[in-house]
Each structure stands twice: as structure tokens, then as C-alpha cells.
Amino acid sequence: MKRGRKPGDHDSKKAEIAEAAYKTLLRVGIGNASLADIAREMGYTTGVLRHYFKDKEELLLFAKNMLFDRANARAREAAAGTEGLERLRIMVTDSLSLDPDTIDRWRLLTMFSGKAIGDARLMALQQKRNERFWQLLEEELIQLQEAGHLSSQMDAALEARGIVAFGDGLADQIIMKPKAWTQAQLQTLVASYLEGFLSRCARREPRKR
């Protein structure tokens, strides 16, 4: 029998390292933490971290993407069993919560974006990630169009980017002063945004018989 790591061990170890590392980065700041500092905080050697990540930027990128993948999965899980516009409302609301995981997710994104400014490689990676997220949301909107909830004239790509921009802007405010917001206030703002979205995009033309 062949010996070695079981399938999935490598990915699970990367996730374990990223889980601990992003908390260290958020606590001390990316500019104040080297890969060696992160390893020391976690009780690892630098060699262990470098086995999985070539540098601090790659670790930060992986951690950021991991948190957003989890958030996307959580939003879809929260909306499971719902249909139509209610599904969209739940998914958008769930992505803008005041729980610690959500706030950490946005803080890590802000940290990565700041690091990426002036670095064409990191900017390209983030843009690729943005496009993937826009596409996922665009697919949700297209499904609502096909089900007859939204106008066939709606530009799904444009509206998907608009929803993301709304969420990003609100997230910037939340991470700067999270205690200034309540969940009820966020839900009110999301509801107001979606009301405006529906005033533009809700289906108005009669269904064909």
C-alpha cells in the first residue's frame, strides 16, 4: 500500500493555516507581520508555511478567497428552499451581516486591496475574482428573468455589478465602525436598495398565453 498524505490533506492543511494566519494578519496588520511572524504566532516554522504558500501575499490571497467562498456557500444555504425574489433578498441580506466572520471577511478584502494597489499581478488576481463573483450573481438574476420575476429587458450583468458595488460600499462603512450599525438598519438599507432595483427591473410586460 502506498503511504503518504490522504487525498484532500494538502487542501485541508492550507485551509487550516489560512484560518489561523488571517486572524494574525487582522490583529497586527499586514505591514507589521512577516511570514516568519505568522508562523511563530501559529507555532509553526517558516518552512512549514512556505511548503504551502510561497509568500505572505499568496497566503493572504488564499485566506481572502477562502472566506468569500464560505460566505457564498452560506448565502446559498440561507436561501435554500426559497424561490424568486425572496431568494435574492435573503442572499444579499446574508452577505451583509454584523457577525464577526462577515466583518473579518470584509476587513481581509480591504487589506488585500490595499496591498494590491500598485501591484499589477495582485490587481489582476483580484479582478479575476471579482469577475467570478459577478458572474455567479448574474446567473442568479438571469434565472429570475427566465422565471418571469424580472424584466427581459434588464441588463443582468450591469445589475449584478451594481449589487456588488452597493455591498462593497456598505461593507467599507461597516468595517470602519461596526458598532455604529445594527442588523435592523442594514436590513432596512438592503430592503430599500432592492426596492429601487425592482422599480427598475421588475417584470412589467404581460406574460404570453
Image: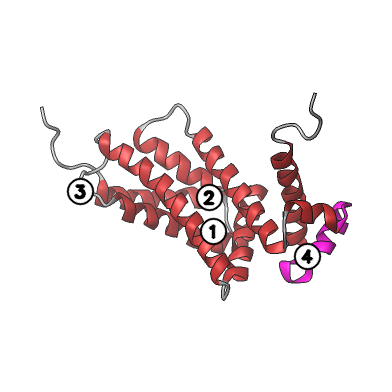
Q: What range of the chain is rendered magenta?
A: 29-45
Most extreme residue toward the top is 1
Vertical comparison of 112 with 149: above or below: below
Residue to which mark 3 is pinned: 153
Tag in front: 4 or 1: 4
- Residue 98 left/right relative to 200: right
Tag in front: 3 or 1: 3
Determine the CA span between mark 3 and mark 4: 48 Å
Determine the CA span between mark 2 and mark 1: 7 Å
Q: In which quadrant of the rendered view does residue 3 lie?
A: top right
Secondary element type, mark 4: helix
Amino acid type, callout 1: Ala
Determine the CA span between mark 2 and mark 4: 25 Å
Residue to which mark 4 is pinned: 28
Residue to which mark 2 is pinned: 96
Circle nearer the N terminus (2, 3): 2
Q: Local crowd at mark 3 within 10 Å, few (<14), some, or many (≥20)?
A: few
Amino acid type, callout 2: Leu
Which sits in the foreground, 173 or 162? 162
Q: Residue at x 63, y 60 (%)?
A: 107
User: Is 172 one of the magenta-colored residues?
Assistant: no
Circle nearer the N terminus (2, 1): 2
Amino acid type, callout 3: Gln
- Residue 49 left/right relative to 136: right
Q: Local crowd at mark 2 within 10 Å, few (<14), some, or many (≥20)?
A: many
Residue to which mark 1 is pinned: 171
Q: Residue at x 78, y 56 (%)?
A: 50
- Residue 204 left/right relative to 42: left
